[in-house]
Image (cartoon, grey):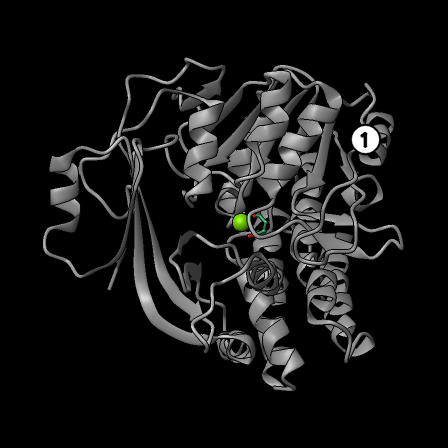
Amino acid sequence: MIIFKFGGASVKNAQSVKNIAGIIRQAPGPLIAVVSAMGKTTNRLETILEKGINNSGEYKELMEELILDHLDLISKLIPDPTHPLFEEVRFLFLQAANMLKTYEGKEYNFIYDQVVSVGELVSTKIVSTWLEYSGISNHWVDIRQILKTDSSYREAIVNHEISASLCRNMFQASNPPCFITQGFIGSDMKNHTTTLGREGSDYTAALLADYLDAENVTLWKDVDGIFNADPARFSNVRKIDTMDYQEVIELTYYGAKVIHPKTIRPLFEKRIPLFVKNFNAPEKSGTAVGKTGFSENRDSFIIVLENQLLISVSKNDLSFISELNLSYLFDLLHSFRLKANLMQHSAVSFSFCVDTPKGKAVKELIVKLQKEFKVLYNTNLLLITVRNYSPELIHELIGNKNVLVEQRSRQTVQFVIA
Ligand code: ASP
Ligand code: MG
């Protein structure tokens, strides 16, 4: 079995759906294709959810637009307007919109998962139907029946024991040997839909590979592989041909957006090779991720995170920040689904950098912190991380920018910049 993962950009329009069908057709053997929501669908569903929860009627229009965009895409694949796929897709979206009413007043993270998950259900229906239509038989699998999680909505923890055995049953050798399924979503023990965190489809692909002892995993992207810096931000970037698991884990930990941070561990344990390839140029070699020592000569990697919020907390009476304070703090961050991208401790204060939460959540976070601590914060900062740095590179990147925090170890340096 091999696993392919197709991200949103690889299914953003009818042409791209046809393109990935071509890639699937050429696959050498039994295959599972994990497909993300199309284009920016997940972001759009987040906006719809936001508006719906805040009782802005606008959510209905936005939902209708999203439906029409999908129907339009389908009509470019399947000219027959009576094909059942049109109704099926409309129904799935309307069902998601109804969840806003059904679950009104329930916990935000729970509603989020019920609504936002529809993006992957729809995209996989479309891809599966198109493949069938163009002569590639396949099974559409609702992964929620086999990927079981706890109930930490929006960041659900997968139960590997149950999921692995359900997956092995589901993905047995079959004829046709091609399965189409969703990434990012699962379900809890009460069969409510859960999600694994944004960009979680990479992680799903890795889990399936682990459970099924797959031969390899390919993440199909709109770039030629993993680069030593974001090609959209820097010129002079270099595509990396081979990397070891360890180095990729480090990069994703510091926020490199190439791969979801949880993807590597399941692959590493079984030494399952991972390829990152360009769906627009499948003949190119891409980046291969594998065993220790696989990394080429020590490349410098640059990771830039935008829109960072730097928060410093201290106790009003200048007492030390205790383990108990820290545990309160991390629980609070977790409840906002935030991760500390950088931390610094001094005698009486603790500073950390997080992605700025969306909308009203920023204010809520600060207010909650102020209940326990004296709080200082700066908004709209950049966090620059350099792995395998050199003085020249740092000079080039930082120059005389206003550095608020700097942290240096032998391999890694991080700067928070105003
Ligand atoms: N569609 C989800 C997202 O955009 C999951 C994924 O693409 O991996 O975050
Ligand atoms: Mg995506």
| Nearest the eye: 357 or 402 | 402
Q: At which x and y percent is residue 331?
A: 62, 61
Q: Above or below — where is 162 with respect to 344?
A: above
Task: Give the residue displayed 74% in from the left and 29% down from the top.
Answer: 137
Task: Give the residue displayed 31% in from the left and 31% down from the top.
Answer: 411
Q: In which quarter of the image is the N terminus?
A: top right
Total marks in image: 1
| Nearest the eye: 11 or 113 | 113
* Local crowd size for mark 1, using a 10 Å CA cut-off: few (<14), some (14–19), many (≥20): some
Left or right: residue 122 versus residue 99 is left
Does any portion of residue 334 appear in the rendered image? Answer: yes
Left or right: residue 122 versus residue 248 is right
Q: In which quarter of the image is residue 409?
A: top left
Task: Give the residue displayed 79% in from the left and 39% down from the top.
Answer: 159
Q: Above or below — where is 364 with respect to 268?
A: below
Q: At which x and y percent is residue 218?
A: 54, 27
Does any portion of residue 277 appear in the rendered image? Answer: no
Left or right: residue 117 versus residue 62 is right
Q: In which quarter of the image is the C terminus?
A: bottom left
Pointer 1 residue: 167
| Nearest the eye: 229 or 28 | 229
Q: At which x and y percent is residue 133?
A: 69, 38
Q: Quadrant of residue 316?
A: bottom left
Q: At which x and y percent is residue 410?
A: 29, 31
Q: What residue type is labelled 1?
A: Cys
**Element under label 1?**
helix
